[in-house]
Amino acid sequence: MRLRLVAVLLVAGTLATLAWYSELFTVEKSGAVPRPLELLPADSRGTARFDAMLAVVPVGVQHLRPGGSVMLVHYWAPWERHSGVQAKTLDSLRSALPPGAVQVAVVCFDPFPSVARYVGRMRLRVPVMLDPRRSLARTLPCPSIPYTYVIDRAGRIAVVQGGEIDWLSPATRATLDRVIDEAPPPRPDSGTAL
């Protein structure tokens, strides 16, 4: 009887450890340096398909859906290495871009109280959104923290990049400017008017 109890507890402990471990994120290796955003060739861009309503810190809700405007989605966490520098420099880049040119979304999976305290302490103006149920991450995957996507106006993935980004690099700005300046997607022909 005692051997059976030990076996059951061992199996339960193993399953609990595996479930806990599956919830952990792959974090960028230490020693990696921030890189500029790298544009994917236009002919190799896949279509982004997501539709998510996310809470915005400190208050509000944002609807994220690809197409119509350039969108930058940066998966981020306050506990990641250099999280403050990444958030502050992305905030600075956003302020330097033409108004309304890029919709920026910093997406975090952590609980509201800790993220709200961090955002307040850092005085961030960039929209930080919470995705605790991973409604966005289910369709726009986040295989590691940090992870970044840039979606063009046609709703195609123009940049997909893991790791820290050098947000203030001239190459990053040039990549975003190229995506901003791309011709808008053609409108479907609605027929001829009589």
Image (cartoon, rainbow, N blue to C red):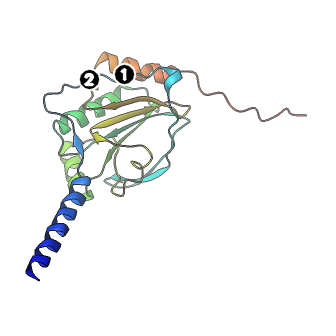
Say whether residue 160 is left or right of residue 64.
left
Residue at image location 42% in from the left, 49% down from the top? 136
Observer-nearest residue: 190 or 113? 190
User: Foreground: 2 or 186?
Assistant: 2
Tell me whether the residue at label 2 lies in contact with that at label 1, contact meaning CB atoms closer than 8 angstroms: yes
| Label placed on residue 35 | 2
Q: Residue 26 falls in which quadrant of the image? A: top left
Foreground residue among 20 and 89: 20
What type is the residue that disc 1 sits on? Glu
Q: Residue 38 shows which numbered tag?
A: 1
Quadrant the N terminus occupies: bottom left
- As drawn, which residue projects farthest toward the right? 194
Residue 103 image-quadrant placement: top left
On screen, residue 155 above or below 37? below
Res 175 → quadrant: top left
User: Where is residue 41 shown, x and y percent of the image?
Assistant: 47, 20
- Quarter of the image where the C terminus is located: top right
Name the kind of residue labelled 2 in the image: Arg
Element under disc 1: loop
Helix, strand or loop at mark 2: loop
Question: Residue 77 placed where, x, y %?
Answer: 24, 45
Q: Is residue 76 above or below residue 188?
A: below
Looking at the image, residue 42 lies above or below residue 117: above
Residue 111, disc: none
* Residue 57 appears in the picture as rendered: yes
